[in-house]
Amino acid sequence: MEFNIKSGHPEKQRTACIILGIYEPRRLSEIAKRIDKVSDGYLSSILRRGDLEGFPGQSLLLHNVPGTLADRVLLIGCGRERELGDMQYRNIISSAIRILQETGSLEAVCYLTELNVRSRGTAWRIRQAIEMAHAALYVFDQLKTIKQNTRRHLRKIVFSVTSRRELGLAEQANREAQKISEGVKLAKDLGNLPPNICTPTYLADQAKILCSLHENLSCKVLLEKHLEKQGLNALLAVSKGSIQAPRLIILEYQASPTKDAPFVLVGKGVTFDSGGLSLKPAKDMDEMKFDMSGAAAVLGTISAAAELQLPINIVGIIPAVENLPGGKAVKPGDIVTSLSGQTIEILNTDAEGRLILSDALTYAERYKPAAVIDIATLTGACVIALGKHAHGLLSNHNPLTNDLINAGKFSGDQAWELPLWDEYQEQIDSRFADLANIGGREAGTITAACFLSRFTRKYRWAHLDIAGTAWLSDKKEKGATGRPVPLLTQYLIEQSQTVIKELNALEYKK
């Protein structure tokens, strides 16, 4: 798919389709008014007849509109102009792209990017439009013998800006959107693969392939013997029931001109989670292939950052295991000594993500990080609390929390902060070890984060629980979402902008 940015009059576009917005009730957007004028009121007459009210989700495809050079004009309902906000704008774009694909248009010029969205500028509108277009067109059919047959594939979309002065910002937004979308696609593809293909070894191989594409990106993989030697016993405990060998995957992206401390991303990589001896119910267990979505998000985010050549240092750490019952599997009641030296009583083998993350978070200390963010499909409690819309966010550093929340708001990939108070810590106390790996039914998302916080005291840390947001279960839309790649990439873009400002200030002083 090709995406371009352009400034030009709609009536002069020689294309398969132009896309215009109609507000409720039956009100033409500014660009639609221009087409109405050159067509001698053709659009107005259609609206007066009641063919389109302008409600969100409505659409009307017109052919051979007088005064235009386009084959078709697609009218999209945008709701009330004053109420047009972020989510509604994204839905409008998604709706338009899906209709385009269904109509068989090979190309289109979209003027929805000139709509007034509350508190949002041109760059935001362009970036969101391209990201939503990618999402609307995504298909996972690698394992189908008969591919989805679209009559005529949409090949090119041009997004419009109001003036040539905006082209520079819009082109940068286009570039960011393309690379973020590629990162999201990578995360989706990995998440959607079946667990007999996407194993810990497969994840490690994909990390190596990613590193081969970028000079300033390197990868090392710790095998089982290395993990045993270094003492990552909590991670090893989870993998004991499976014949699939565990891996600790470390990616290092080095692009800071001043050798700054890296931002470390830690992604949970349980390629299949049966629950171990604390076996999960059979219903929907197939969805436990998505339990490596945190790992996929790390790979997708680092891919986007490397493609954008962000001038910062990033480290990705992925503990990759398979959690199955077996003769050697860890048992409820077992106690292991983690890499940090703290002992953990394993009361439930289905609370395995926090075990592998505990060793990975301790491993992150050696990088003396600027900040550490872990990403994990960690708790069903987060699904109950926040549903599929917001990631759960818990942190030991308020500025980091604020940065992530703001990045989520800008990217449309939002997180919601939950408390990480000392009062919750006693729930994970153990009579027989330093801590237990579960804290009871109450506040499950928070106590899971409390567990992780015991291993993050030496640096600034945030935890993203993506159990509700990493995939969709609805039959028609079932599959990985690629979240939170947009949030994380936006956060890193903002951190790199701070670095650039500091470098410019130093140059100015010289």
Image (cartoon, rainbow, N blue to C red):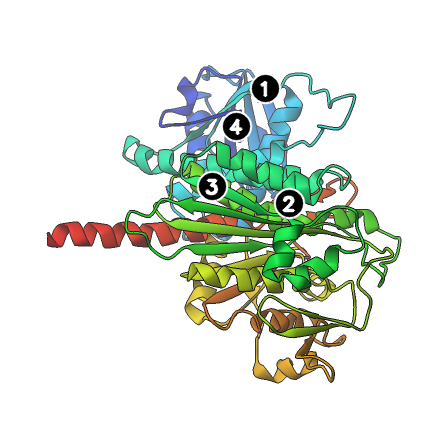
Crowding near pointer 2: few (<14 within 10 Å), some, many (20+)?
Answer: many
Disc 2 to disc 1: CB gap under 8 Å? no
- N-terminal label among 4 and 1: 4
Residue 335's place in the image compared with 137, above or below, is below
Q: Label 1 sits on what residue type?
A: Ser
Residue 393's place in the image compared with 105, above or below, is below
Can residue 351 be seen in the rendering of this structure? yes
Crowding near pointer 3: few (<14 within 10 Å), some, many (20+)?
Answer: some
The residue to which callout 1 is attached is 105
Q: Please identify the residue farthest to the left as the structure is shown.
A: 510
Q: CA distance from mark 1 to mark 3?
A: 42 Å
- N-terminal label among 1 and 3: 1
Residue 188's place in the image compared with 327, above or below, is above
| Helix, strand or loop for disc 1 | loop
Can residue 77 be seen in the rendering of this structure? no
| Helix, strand or loop for disc 4 | helix
Q: Which mark is residue 43?
A: 4
Q: Which mark is residue 434?
A: none
Residue at horizontal 73 percent and vertical 23 percent from the top: 148
Q: Label 3 sits on what residue type?
A: Ser
Residue 144 pos. (x, y %): 77, 26
Q: CA distance from mark 3 to mark 4?
A: 56 Å
Residue nearest the viewer, comparing 125 with 506: 506
Residue at horizontal 43 percent and vertical 55 percent from the top: 263
Q: Which mark is residue 481?
A: 2
Q: Label 4 sits on what residue type?
A: Leu
Q: Label 2 sits on what residue type?
A: Thr
- N-terminal label among 2 and 3: 3
Residue 474 pos. (x, y %): 77, 46
- N-terminal label among 2 and 4: 4
